[in-house]
């Protein structure tokens, strides 16, 4: 792949070429220099997608493990997969809720990273959900796959440039809160950015003001109105006793956590632990998207030594499959409410 495709078209960003955002000269030691996506490179990606999708999505959905599985039915092996039958809205993955879907494989999108994890199919699906133009990411990128955080979050910026204002992020997570049972849903009301404690942040490096400010606030990262609506919807569809609110935290993975690590995370105030989402939420807030995120609790974290229980990715995907109908119903009904109320983005 040429440098241009993944490359850095230099000097467009503040903080680049020896000038920091506060005007002081400095020496940039960014190991990713020459590889990060510029605004212009992302526009190239967006132009490609726009040439294949005849509408602008306003809702983006990132499907977590087990919730964005497998390629959906398609006509042939071409890069653009036009799906032609009406799909039962409550069978299959979240992306299968979209009507008249157009599926584009990541392998064909210029500059896009590739999915490597089982349960993460690797395509963008465009269609309508609850009447709203929507793009669904079937397959996200994780740090443990070898992608730096800025690359894991590239699709969030692509969605922003496509027109997405509201981002729904889903994940599979281990339950740390003893009240959580396998199959429960946690509406994320805050996060602890453990990787960020060590300076590993998707916004690290030069800042492009066209995406957002150098120092974005994060105290309202999860839209409170949507969380309240989600609770109301959960009650209406009979899920009241399966939903909670809580704090999500993300470690780099790919190993599941040790008992001591889990007990530390509990003490810090985390209710669920996973390997994604936090950096996507940061990137989305930075570019002024309205964010709603939830975790499907796929396993109870093992927080003591006197057991032979072990978490596994197979269990994670199985629980995703068992709960997908409820999750799809929740998302579909929630979107109807969100857009009925006309919730605006964070900075107006
Ligand atoms: O993509 P998510 O965060 O839903 O996936 C979780 C974390 C790991 O990727 C995987 C572990 O089973 O599930």
Image (cartoon, rainbow, N blue to C red):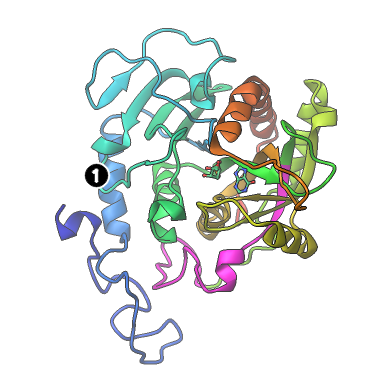
Left or right placement of residue 121 versus residue 197 in this view: left
Left or right of 319? Residue 151 is: left
Q: Which quarter of the frame holds ligand 1? A: top right
Question: In the image, is 235 to the left or to the right of 63?
Answer: right
- Closer to us: 330 or 116: 116
Per the image, the residue denoted by label 1 is 110
Q: Is the magenta stretch mostly helix, strand or loop?
A: loop
Q: Is residue 258 above or below residue 204?
A: above
Residue 127 quadrant: top left
Label 1 sits on a secondary structure element that is loop
Depicted 89 relative to depicted 168: above or below: above
Is the CB of mark 1 within 8 Å of ligand 1? Answer: no
- Residue 250 in magenta? no
Q: In percent of the image, x 26 and y 49: which residue is there?
A: 111
Q: In this view, does 193 lie above or below 320?
A: below
Q: Where is residue 238 in the image (x, y as percent from the top left)?
A: 81, 21
Q: Name the spot of residue 75 as percent of width and height, x first.
A: 28, 12
Q: How crowded is mark 1: few (under 14 residues within 10 Å), some or many (20 or more)?
A: some
**Residue 93 image offset from top left, x and y in percent:** 52, 23
Residue lying farthest to the bottom in this orientation? 25
Give left or right: position of 288 versus 19.
right
Residue at 74% x, 48% y: name it. Answer: 224
Query: In this rendering, does residue 53 appear at all?
Result: no
Could you say which is closer to the camera, residue 50 or residue 188? Answer: 188
Residue occupying the far left of the picture? 2
Residue 269 image position (x, y, % from top left): 78, 60
Quarter of the figure with residue 337: top right
Furthest toward the top, the residue is 85
Q: Give the range drawn in magenta.
A: 187-214
């Amino acid at each position: 792949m040429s440098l241009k495709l993944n490359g850095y078209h230099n000097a467009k960003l503040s903080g680049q070429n020896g000038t920091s955002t506060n005007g002081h000269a400095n020496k940039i030691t960014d190991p990713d220099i020459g590889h990060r996506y510029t605004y212009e490179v992302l526009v190239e990606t967006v132009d490609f997608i726009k040439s294949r999708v005849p509408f602008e999505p306003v809702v983006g959905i990132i499907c977590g493990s087990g919730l964005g599985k497998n390629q959906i039915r398609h006509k042939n092996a071409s890069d653009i997969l036009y799906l032609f039958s009406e799909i039962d809205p409550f069978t299959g993955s979240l992306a299968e809720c979209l009507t008249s879907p157009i599926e584009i494989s990541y392998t064909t999108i210029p500059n896009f990273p590739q999915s490597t994890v089982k349960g993460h199919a690797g395509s963008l699906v465009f269609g309508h959900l609850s009447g709203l133009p929507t793009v669904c990411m079937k397959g996200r990128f994780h740090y443990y796959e070898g992608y730096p955080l800025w690359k894991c979050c590239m699709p969030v910026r692509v969605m922003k440039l496509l027109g997405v204002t509201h981002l729904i992020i889903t994940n599979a997570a281990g339950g740390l809160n003893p009240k959580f049972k396998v199959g429960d849903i946690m509406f994320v009301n805050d996060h602890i950015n453990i990787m960020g404690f060590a300076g590993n942040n998707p916004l690290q490096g030069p800042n492009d003001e066209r995406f957002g400010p150098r120092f974005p606030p994060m105290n309202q990262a999860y839209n409170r109105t949507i969380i309240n609506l989600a609770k109301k919807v959960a009650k209406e569809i009979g899920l009241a006793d399966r939903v909670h609110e809580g704090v999500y935290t993300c470690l780099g993975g790919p190993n599941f956590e040790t008992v001591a690590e889990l007990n530390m995370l509990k003490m810090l105030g985390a209710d669920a632990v996973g390997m994604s989402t936090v950096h996507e939420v940061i990137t989305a807030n930075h570019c002024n998207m309205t964010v709603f995120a939830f975790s499907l609790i796929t396993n109870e974290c093992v927080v003591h030594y006197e057991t032979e229980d072990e978490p596994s990715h197979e269990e994670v995907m199985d629980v995703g499959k068992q709960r997908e109908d409820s999750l799809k119903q929740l998302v579909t009904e929630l979107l109807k409410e969100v857009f009925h109320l006309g919730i605006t983005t964070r900075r107006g």
